[in-house]
Amino acid sequence: MSKPVKTIVIVGAGTMGSGIALTAAQSGIRAVQIDVNAAQLEKARGYHTKQIARLVEKQKMTADDAAATAARLEYAADFTAFKDAECVVEAASENPEVKKKLFRSFAETFAADALLATNTSSISITDIATAAGARASQVIGMHFFNPVPVMKLVEVIRGLATSDETVTRTLDLARTMGKTPVLANDRAGFVSNRVLMPLINEAFYAWMEGVAKPEDIDQIMVLGCNFPMGPLRLADFIGLDVCHDIMMVLYRELGDPKFFPCPMLRQLVTAGRLGNKTNLGVFEYPPRV
Ligand code: NAD
């Protein structure tokens, strides 16, 4: 067993960051949640409180465990006060410039042997690692899935400079967090989105060409292929803008026109129909209370 992670700093308190922080705290790790947006931090705090209460209610957690988990969660606007953390996981917006700026700062802030992980869905780990300079060997992809507390997989992606020790420690950390890590190399979309996104894109083509209605496309894939959710509903859940952006990364990086986003997908994104988060995407959703 490699050096254990006692404190993990999670930068970005959105959908993914808040889930990663909760999962870490539940696994006995001190989890420091960072966000530049105070409202997002408060939202994450509310989400944690609600989830912990729900686990107690369902008798999946004792009151003592709930109190201990809550005590392991901390919230701050800036990570520089937590420079002794053994690991930082970046879960900020899917923008290379935002991520590189953060990794430049991580390399200056955290201990010489800290793990510098990113939860990116599609951006090259090798590219992000260039921002960490001499610390590039500590940079790794730790790709969690949504919703983090439920989904078992962590796709672990090594960049060109990632050291074996960084990989071993990341695999150990993922297991400590109750996840199953699986290794992938640093190619656009890694494995998960390289395979999933073209499937979703093809479902949009099937709809656009009138092969079937959206609900029937989904039902065929659920009943015929044993998918837990149809590809179009899954696209709404992920966010149509996110699906579009990932297809563009695949298209640009792999240079194959088969990855170009379907016109139907592009049109919905242009219209602001982004899926669950806007209550309208392929399907309509009741507003969240
Ligand atoms: P999100 O928009 O819900 O959250 C991003 C958060 O990062 C926001 O709260 C924002 O205020 C914060 N942020 C932005 N810049 C920051 C900075 N410089 N410092 C601190 N905080 C900053 O996004 P998300 O869906 O949680 O995605 C986060 C990352 O995880 C992205 O890289 C995304 O591609 C990846 N990812 C998303 C999913 C998914 O299903 N949503 C799945 C796997 C991976």
Image (spheres, rainbow, N blue to C red):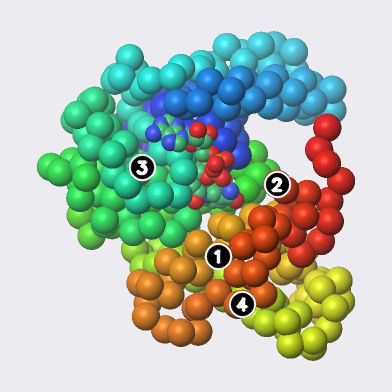
The image shows residue 168 at horizontal and vertical percentages of 33, 47
CA gap, disc 1 to disc 2? 15 Å
Does 159 sit above or below residue 205?
above
Which image quarter holds the C terminus? top right
Q: Which residue is mark 4?
A: 263
Mark identifier at residue 277: 2
Relative to the observer, which residue lies in front, 130 or 5? 130
Which residue type carries mark 3?
Val
Which mark is first along the chain, 3 or 4? 3
Between marks 3 and 2, how big is the CA–CA gap? Answer: 22 Å
Find residue 98 and name its label.
3
> How far apart in space, not on screen, are marks 4 and 1 (Cα)?
10 Å
> How many residues crowd mark 4 within 10 Å: few (<14), some (14–19), many (20+)?
few
Are circles 1 and 3 on residues that touch, CB within 8 Å? Answer: no
Give the mark nearer the N terminus: 4 vs 1: 1
- Viewer-proximal residue among 41 and 140: 41
Secondary structure, mark 3, is: helix
**Image location of residue 256, percent across then percent down:** 42, 84
Which residue appears at 44% of the width and 59% of the height? 122
Left or right: 5 with respect to 144? Answer: left
Callout 4 touching callout 1 (CB < 8 Å): no
